[in-house]
Amino acid sequence: MKYVFLIFFMNLLPQYAGKSLRRDDSYLKTFEDIKNEIAGYTDIAKAIIDLAVHGKAQNRSYERLAVFADTIGPRLSGSKNLDAAIKYMFSALQEDGLENVHLEPVKVPHWERGEEFAMMLEPRNHSIAILGLGSSVATPPEGITAEVIVVASFDELHKRAQEAKGKIVVYNEPFTSYGETVQYRSQGAVEAAKVGAVASLIRSIASFSIHSPHTGWQNYQSDVPWIPTACISVEDAEMMSRMSFRGTKIVVHLKMGAKTYPDSPSFNTVAEIVGSKYPEQIVLVSGHLDSWDVGQGAMDDGGGAFISWEALSLIKDLGLRPKRTLRLVLWTAEEQGGVGAEQYYQLHKENINNFDIVMESDEGTFKPSGLGFTGNAKARDIMKEIMTLLQPINVTDVYDDADGTDINYWMRDGVPGASLHDDLSKYFWFHHSQGDTMTVQDPNQMNLCAAVWTVVSYVIADMEEMLPSLCNYVKIRFMETKEGNSGGGTTEIRTM
C-alpha cells in the first residue's frame, strides 16, 4: 500500500500554477524567513515615508481633500451631492493615472430630512437645536405638541411606561463609549414607541458638545409604530433633565418634514495598481465617500477615503508595482449600514480566496499609533513585523480587532482585516455634526496616516505569500491503494 503523490500533484498544479497559496498550517516559509523578507522592505518603507511626510507629496492628501470637501460639501446617500462626488472622484482617479478606474453600480437608501425645528413652550420659550435621525418619519404637517418625559436609560423608560404614553421621550443617556451609547440613537424611537410615546429626542452621541446636535442612522421595527425621532444637543438634554428632576412640566412643539424615497442608483468607486505576478490576488484599501448631510464630511470619512487614494498615488509615484493588485474602493452608503459594501461583497465573494487583506480607514485621520487587526495568530505575527518598518515615524503598534462597517462582511468570513488606529480623543466632538469640516483636519497628521496606510498595503501586496487566513484552507486527502489497483488521490479545496 502507498500514497499516490504523483496523482495529487497532477491534480493540484494545473489549478494553482503561478499562484501563491495561502497555507494556514503549512506555510512554505519559516517565520524567520518571513522576518527576513519583511526586513528587506526597509529602504522602500523609508522612501514611502520620506515622500509622504517630507517630500513632494507632503500635504497632498489634505490639499486634495480640501478641494473636494469645499467643492462638493456633504454627501448623503441618494443625494445630488453624492452623485457629484462620485463623478468628481472618477475623473480625479483617472487623471492620477491609476488603472482600471471604474464604477460598480449599487442601490442605496434615499432619505431627506426636510424642514425641521423644535421649540420648548413650557416652562419658557426656547429653541431646541435638532437634527432628524436617518430614516425618521415626519410629524403631521401641523407638528406635534406634547409634554416631555426625560429618562436616562431604557430601563428607566420601561419602569415609567405608564407616564410615557402620549408624551415625547427625551433620552439623557450619559456618554460612555460610542459603541455602547449609540444604541439610544439606533433604538430610541422603537423603545419609546413601545410604551406609547408620540416622538423621541435623543441626547447626541458625543463626548463633548458646543450646543451642536449629532445625527446618524436609526432603525424602526415593522411591528412597532414608527414615530418621529431626532437628536438634540447635550446641553438641551441636560437642561431638560434638570428641569424634570425639579418637577417642572416641560412641553415641546416638534415639526419634522422628513421623507423616504425609493432606493436610488449609486456606485462604489474603484481604482487599481495591477499586480505584476499575482494580479488576481487583492489587497484592498478603502474609505467611504458618502457622509451625512451636515458639515463637510471631511473627517467622516473624507480623510480615510483620501489617504486610501494617496496610498496608490505614492506607490505609483515611486514607480513601484507590487506582486498583487492593490485595489482602492471608495464605498457608498456606509452611513446607512454599509449598503454599498454589502452589495460589493455579494458581487465579489465568489473570489474570496483571492482577497489577501481588507483595509478600511473610517475613524478619523488624526495622529496614528498603529493598526487594528483581525486575523489568526500567524497573520498577526506577520503584521507585527511589517509594522516595525514604521519605526521612523514611531507608529508600530498592532491592536486587537480591526473596525470598519464596510470590511466586516469579509472579516466575518475569515479574510484578515486592518483599520487605522489613531487618536480618537476628539473624534466624537465632531462626528455626524455641523462641526465635521476641513478645520478638523491636520495636514501633518494626514501625511503620517498616508505613510502608514501605504507601507502596510504595499508590503502585504508585494510579499511572496499571502497572509495566513481563516477563510480558506487546502485539505489534502490521500487515498491508499493496493499495488495493481487503479487507485488515485483526491484534493479538496474548501471555503469556510
Image (tube, rainbow, N blue to C red):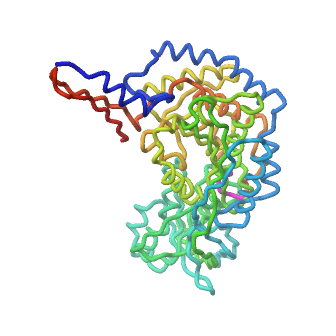
Q: Up-down: is 231 above or below 50?
A: below
**Residue positioned 59% across, 63% down in the render:** 237
Q: Position of residue 294 (x, y in %)?
A: 71, 61
For image coordinates 60% across by 20% down, the residue present is: 388
Image coords of residue 195 (percent x, y): 41, 74
Residue 249 on image: x %, y %: 56, 75
- As drawn, 48 above or below 339: above
Which quadrant does the N terminus fall into? top left
- The outermost residue toward the right is 56
The quadrant in which the C terminus is found is top left
Residue 495 in the figure: left or right of residue 205: left
On screen, residue 186 versus residue 130, left or right, reads left
- Residue 380: percent from left, percent from top: 48, 27
Q: Closest to the observer: 82 or 283?
A: 283
- Choose top left, top right, bottom left or bottom right for residue 447: top right
Q: How many marks?
A: 0
Residue at 65% from the left image edge and 67% from the top image edge:
130
Height in image: 148 above or below 288?
below
The foreground one among 224 and 204 is 224
Magenta stretch: includes residue 95 = no
Magenta includes 430?
A: yes
Q: 328 or 230: nearer the eye?
A: 328
Q: Which residue reaches farthest bottom? A: 142
Q: Is residue 383 above or below residue 86?
A: above
The quarter of the displayed image where residue 476 is located = top left
Q: Is residue 126 left or right of residue 380?
A: right
> Residue at position x 43%, y 62% from top?
154
Q: From which residue to which does the magenta span run?
A: 428-434
